[in-house]
Amino acid sequence: MHLNAFLMPAGHHDAAWRHPSSGADRATDVAYYQDLARTAERGRLDSVFFADGVAIRPAPAANVAGGLEPLTLLAALAVVTSRVGLIATASTTFYEPYTLARAFASLDHISGGRAGWNIVTSGTEAEARNFNRDTHLDHAVRYQRAAEFVDVANALWESWEPDAIVFDRDAGVYADPSKIHDVGHTGEHFRVRGPLNVPRSPQGRPLLVQAGSSEDGRAFAARHAEAIFTAQQTLADGQAFYRDVKARAARHGRDPRILPGICPVLGSTEEEAHRLSESLTELQVLDYGLEQLSGMLNVDLSGYPLDGPLPDVLPSEDEINGNKSRFTLVARLARREKLTIRQIIARLGGGRGHRVFAGTPEQVADELEEWHRLGAADGFNIMPPVLPTGLEDFVDHVVPLLQKRGLFRHEYESTTLRGHYGLD
Amino acid sequence: MHLNAFLMPAGHHDAAWRHPSSGADRATDVAYYQDLARTAERGRLDSVFFADGVAIRPAPAANVAGGLEPLTLLAALAVVTSRVGLIATASTTFYEPYTLARAFASLDHISGGRAGWNIVTSGTEAEARNFNRDTHLDHAVRYQRAAEFVDVANALWESWEPDAIVFDRDAGVYADPSKIHDVGHTGEHFRVRGPLNVPRSPQGRPLLVQAGSSEDGRAFAARHAEAIFTAQQTLADGQAFYRDVKARAARHGRDPRILPGICPVLGSTEEEAHRLSESLTELQVLDYGLEQLSGMLNVDLSGYPLDGPLPDVLPSEDEINGNKSRFTLVARLARREKLTIRQIIARLGGGRGHRVFAGTPEQVADELEEWHRLGAADGFNIMPPVLPTGLEDFVDHVVPLLQKRGLFRHEYESTTLRGHYGLD
Ligand SMILES: Cc1cc2nc3c(=O)[nH]c(=O)nc-3n(C[C@H](O)[C@H](O)[C@H](O)COP(=O)(O)O)c2cc1C
Ligand SMILES: Cc1cc2nc3c(=O)[nH]c(=O)nc-3n(C[C@H](O)[C@H](O)[C@H](O)COP(=O)(O)O)c2cc1C
């Protein structure tokens, strides 16, 4: 079983920042994130992961807004840890391949082979407006650009053969130019000559992670991803996604690791866990929740009664140009469970659409074991509701149970991120 | 007097990598750079600095090629140092302002207010070819883009007022949206709405450094730079440059620090210093030197006798689309001293056009004091011929002399980079 810790300043519950034990007041303090990474490493987790967006909109009144940039942050975490993998999100829509390829190659050197890249295409118009555009690129075009982008980045990472550096001081030969190759890429979106200006890194290239579950997202993941983050509400949905993506990938001779997200609300008793859950729900700022939900569904919900249902007519997934799969997940959840708007806000508070599970360490371990055994997961994206405490609880109380059951490593068996995930 | 350590893997002499005491074999080893940064901090230097280019061309047979990316590297240095400033080069021609502004804001947070940005426009066509272009942008257009770029970046760094984060857990108010501003920039080169997604950093923005000395470069520096790196071969040239740039800046009510580069070749006796100089010249790979010189002058010199002069007809500075000021410096040096091509290669080997000075610590301190006293420098960009030894020698033997003469601080008196340079 593989475990990734998805890190944020306050935690994954949207009210976590108001909880007294959250580190929300340390959102720009590198020492805070270093402590979180050390905790993950103490638990022998495969990796830590930071999401990323290139805008804050709308105005961030009621939740942590802004933070550190993931690549610089991970470089600062790399030098105080030695084993845990370090995954940064970066958008193919707003980076240039040369810039991104060298930053990740550099991070892979700095971390001794522990860099990972969560490849996203960016879902919001606010982001486009920070990069010379009035409207967002179409969803389909974003994925086309992403595919070409990854091809270029892969070629850049391959541009130095492993033995290109000769380092013969006596003969005055530093490198063998015949082992450093041009890329010579000319495509629809990019023209890049190469070679990269960073020598080949320990892993050769970062672990490639992907996190979009729409039709285009799955097709992209099947071709390129080595690990996949996904939001799945029910075991049945998780199994269906797992089967579908594994089958698509198999057609390309590939076998990516699939990690659904879970927000584990831990208590030493079931009651304690539920009390934490409820106390977080009580801390929610409803206006904020409504705004988030309106954004996910692309509908202005401010006129609707909080204790009534969603409007009868929602857009179809085709009309969504942002995060298509999250739209569909939320719409299905609301209909299946006949939730009011207030109830949806409470349900999404814990994990923005990811599965939330409140219980004892034993119950959480059971849940993870079940999804793993029944073909819904190769591992999990752990999204603690409150940080740092939720990660500490998970590492101290859930990980030992998984280890005792023979489901999770006792010690790292590899020095690289790709090694932790059993890839070469 | 201000002192910046210009760091490279092997050192500034182009044959340094062949010297047994250079760290050229550790070009991608973060621990090596951490040691260098600690040495600079031990010497109470204002800052360390990394140059940057976004290509390696032509094929890197005879010198260290490739290395770590400066922003990730500096983040990894920030967390093992506490005072020394950290300056990264980044190109306005190939970055987007939003991406760059947030990376530097993040570095400023990670370092507790020690980030600096060396603003360059990039000089080579090889770089353009890694970024979707067949030819380089015109020199003048590059500087126009640079000016607009810096305006946007400054606006993004200003977009969070210092007290924007309210952090009232009880009331559920994280930030005051009226203190987080859109940038709303619409210009020739960029459209950026903002605000930045990183809260205001300790320095507000990084120290702005500039390093191009052409007419356009000086005009840009006068408006934007807080510190200026420059290559000046003679005291008279240094004085003229200093006077000119200070006067231009004064017209904008500004007073940037001017730091000419110097490559100090140190020995405990004069003879020892000259022996080191000569041994480095002997290690030069002539083909490499010829290629570099051809590039600087935009003339293919491979057909010319090494022991003869430069061709009579060189391009004029107008025709140079790369580094205009370096072209002029080299052409003038060759004519003034009637050097053969072989002699020029030897002379440029030490500092690629920067002043090279071989002598005892006493003599180097005299030289620095003279330039400082006679109005050619507010400080110096120290470019050790061989690293790490050349920096250790400078810190252990020259810095104490400057301190004894009352020219240089004994202890840091500030915690921020801008503070070290006496700016607010
Ligand atoms: C666990 C997880 C993390 C994600 N992190 C990010 C992120 O950091 N930035 C981002 O722009 N999108 C993120 N996404 C969204 C997707 O990567 C993708 O861009 C979006 O879902 C649109 O893809 P889709 O329409 O294929 O679902 C994340 C999704 C998941 C499941
Ligand atoms: C000390 C020093 C360091 C420089 N570092 C870089 C660098 O890292 N990257 C770069 O592209 N140019 C660098 N330059 C070059 C200039 O910043 C500038 O781009 C170039 O000189 C062209 O400007 P000019 O034509 O105005 O002289 C450096 C120049 C000096 C003096």
Image (cartoon, coloured by chain):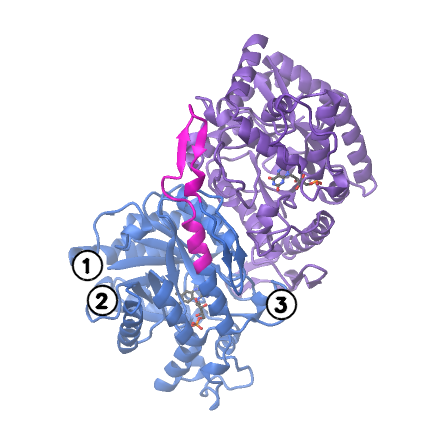
Chain colours: A blue, B purple
Residues rendered magenta in the picture: A151-180
Residue A153 is covered by the magenta coloring: yes
Label 1 vs label 3, nearer the camera: 3
| Residue drawn at 81 percent across, 39 percent down | B248
Q: Which mark is residue A407?
A: 1
Specify whether tag 3 is near ligand 1 (CB below 8 Å). no
Q: Chain of mark 2?
A: A
Where residue A39 sits: x, y (%)?
33, 49
| Residue drawn at 69 percent across, 44 percent down | B321
Element carrying mark 1: loop
**Left or right of residue B372: residue A381:** left
* Nearer the observer, B368 or B64: B64
Which residue is tagged 3?
Answer: A133
Label 1, residues with CA under 10 Å away: few <14, some 14-19, many ≥20 = some
| Residue drawn at 46 percent across, 73 percent down | A323
Which residue is tagged 2?
Answer: A372
Mark 2–mark 1 distance (CA, rounded to whole Å): 9 Å
Q: Quadrant of the N terminus of chain B?
A: top right
Q: Quadrant of the C terminus of chain B?
A: top right
